[in-house]
Image (cartoon, helix red, strand yellow):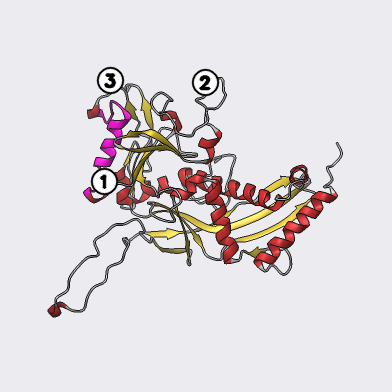
Amino acid sequence: MAKYTLSDRGRRALDGMFTAIAQLNGASRGVQHQFALDPTAEQRLEDLQRENVGFLQRVNIMPVRDMIGQVIGMNAKNLIASRTSRSNLPRKPKYVGNLQDRKFQLHDTEFDTWLPWEIIDAWSRFPDFAQRYARQVAISVALSRIMVGWNGVAAADDTDPEDNPLGEDVNIGWLQKLRLEKPDHVLGRAMVTTGGVTTATGAAAPIYIGPDADHAAGDYKNIDALAYDLIAGMPSWARSSTDHVVLVSQDMIDEKYFPMVNRPLADTIDGGKSTSDQTVSDIVMSSKQIGGRPAAIVPFFPEGTMVVTPLAPAGATDGSNLSLYYQEGSRRRYIKDEPENKASLVDYNSVNEGYVIEDTDFMVMAENITFGARP
C-alpha cells in the first residue's frame, strides 16, 4: 500500500497555522522546537476547552505558581463580619476562603495527539482550518482531563493506557482525593489504616438499592433515600448549601425515571438508552431531582457511583467545589510532521496540573452501588 502524501493545499494550510502559532507565542525557532505558551495563548486554550466541553464550565480552572502548595479553599462561605472595640485593637482580617491544612501537588501531564495527513487535507478545504484544528485538540485534552478527574487514583512515572484505559495512573482525581482526605464522607468502600492514617481505599463494600433493602445492613429502598443519607452526613453548614448537585452514573438511571433535557436519544438497538454524544462530552441535567437536589450525569463518571457537591453555574469562573489547578507558564508544546509516524501531524503538549477539592466538608460519595437485595 502506497504511503499517503500531503497535498500542496494541505501543506500551505499547515505552514500558515505553524507561522501563526509561532508568532502568537514568540517561538522564534518555530513550532517544530519546544516552546512555552504565552500567557494569553495559555488562557485562550483554557477558554477553548471550556467552550467546547461544557462540564469544564462547572469546575474551577485555577492557575497557580508552585507545583506544591496549600489548597486555596475557594468554595468556602465562612463568616468574615466582625466588630472590634477600641480596647481590642488591632482588627483581625479574615481570609475570604477557607484555609485548611491540605496541600495540592501538580504532576507533569502529557497530552500528545496525532492526526493523519488525510484529515489535514480534508480540513484544509475550509478557510477556518486553524480553528478546526485547535478545537479538535482542545476537545481531546478537555475530555481526557475529565476522565482522569473521575477515575485517577495515582500518578505513575510511566503510565500504562492498556492496563489503565480511564487514566487511573495519570493523576489523583477528585474521587480518590475524597477517599484519601475525608474517608468518613465515603460509603461503599472499606476503611484502611496505614501508618496511623485512615483512608477509604479498601475493598468494595457494596450498597444495595431495592424495595426489599434492609437499611440496618447499609442498604436503601431507592436512590433518593441514599442521597438524603449522604447529605445528612455532611456538617450542618455544608449540607445547607443551595449549590449542591447530585452526580450519578449513567447505569443508575433509566429513561423513565430520569428524562433528560436537550439530550438527543441515540438511534440504537436498545431504544436509545446508550450514552449519546452529548452525554460523552457534556454535563446533562435532569428535569427531576434526587434527594431534593438537582441531578446530573457527567462524562466518564464511574458506574455505581453517586456524589453530592456544589458545582459552579454554567459560564461562571468559580464557585465550584471541584477545581483543576495548573502551574502558570508550565505549558510546553511543539508540533511537527512525522512521516515515519503513519504520515501524520504530531502535536506534543504538556502541563503541570492537579485535581483539588476546595472543601472536603462539602463533598460526599457513595460507590459500589448495586440494584437488588443484598445476597
Q: Is residue 34 left or right of residue 308?
A: right
Instruction: Quote the CA–CA distance across marks 1 and 2.
Output: 38 Å
**In the image, farthest residue toward the front:** 127
- Kind of residue at disc 1: Arg
Disc ID at residue 100: none
* Residue under the image location 23 percent in, 48 percent down: 235
Q: Between 164 and 109, which is closer to the camera in this rendering?
A: 109
Which residue has dot 1 on it? 239
- Kind of residue at disc 2: Gly
Instruction: Give, as a single range, the part of the protein colored magenta.
Output: 217-236
In x, y percent, where is residue 203? Answer: 38, 37
Q: Secondary structure at mark 1?
A: helix
Q: Between 315 and 372, which is closer to the camera in this rendering?
A: 315
Q: Secondary structure at mark 2?
A: loop
Q: Is residue 351 above or below residue 27?
A: above
Which residue has dot 2 on it? 271
* Residue under the image location 73 percent in, 65 percent down: 30
Instruction: Give the quarter of the figure containing the C terminus.
Output: top left
In x, y percent, where is residue 181? Answer: 35, 51
Which residue has dot 3 on it? 212
In x, y percent, where is residue 85? Answer: 14, 76
Instruction: Quote the CA–CA distance across marks 2 and 3.
Output: 29 Å
Between discs 1 and 3, the one toward the N terminus: 3
Kindly report which numbered mark, 1 or 3, lies closer to the viewer in this rendering: 1
Q: Between 188 and 320, which is closer to the camera in this rendering?
A: 320
**Most prominent secondary structure in the magenta stretch?**
helix
Between discs 1 and 2, the one toward the N terminus: 1
